Image (cartoon, rainbow, N blue to C red):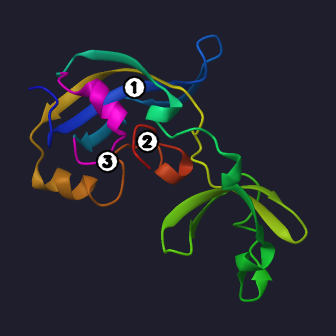
Amino acid sequence: MKITTNKFVAVTYDLNVGEDDERELMERATLGAPLKFIFGTGMMLPAFEDKLKGLGVGEKFNFTLSPADAYGEYEEEHVIELPKNIFEVNGKFDSEMIMEGHMVPMMDSNGNQLNGSVLEVKEDVVVMDFNHPLAGETLHFSGSVIDVHDPTAEEIAELSSGGCGCDSGSCEEGGCCGCGC
């Protein structure tokens, strides 16, 4: 069976980021914790799926996605200072959650959910980065297809419950790098 729309797919891969001369291993999906998804349902980056389309079990892949085909270019205007008081809980600044390096789920004025990374906590403001953690990065995937089949009702329910279908961490923690999060 080949990878086509609405098929259950499981792949293993190494994801390296950076240019050819200085690549860094960012993520690994293994046989014990593969990336699982339903192909063609918007769970994954379109360019990621384009590279896998038509492959079958046992076939290997090795491809590169430019920032434009992945998470876009890094945009300085997505780094903003927010008043520190918006991070108060019961009148007290939440210093356990709002610290450098933490990813914080937030909502914009239109009700859209987004994640921001805390870059710095200053006296009156918190500097947040709302770029995707892999914005501006060239993504290099190499791996193999380990399963392709018609999905069961259980697999559809599990994969449509908000996860990317990989066991390497949540999207908020930077896992599932092929997903469209």
Mark 2 and mark 3 in contact? Answer it, CB < 8 Å: no
Separation of disc 2 and disc 1 at Cα? 11 Å
- Judging depth in this view, the residue of 65 and 176 nearest the camera is 65
Q: Compared with residue 57, is residue 49 higher up or lower down, i.e. above or below? A: below
Q: Which amino acid lies under the numbered mark 1 shown in the image of this protein? A: Tyr
| Residue 123 picture location, percent across and down | 91, 69
Q: Which residue is mark 2?
A: 176
Mark 2 and mark 1 in contact? Answer it, CB < 8 Å: no
| Residue 149 picture location, percent across and down | 11, 35
Tell me what residue is drawn at x 26 percent, y 34 percent. Answer: 10
Q: Would residue 169 appear left or right of 129 to someone viewing this image?
A: left
Q: Which residues are magenta?
A: 40-55
Give whichever of discs 1 and 3 has the lower sequence position: 1
Q: Which residue is mark 1?
A: 13
Q: Is residue 31 visible?
A: no
Q: Compared with residue 173, is residue 90 higher up or lower down, i.e. above or below? A: below
Determine if the magenta segment contains residue 47: yes
Instruction: Tell me the mark number nearer the camera, choosing from 1 and 3.
Output: 3
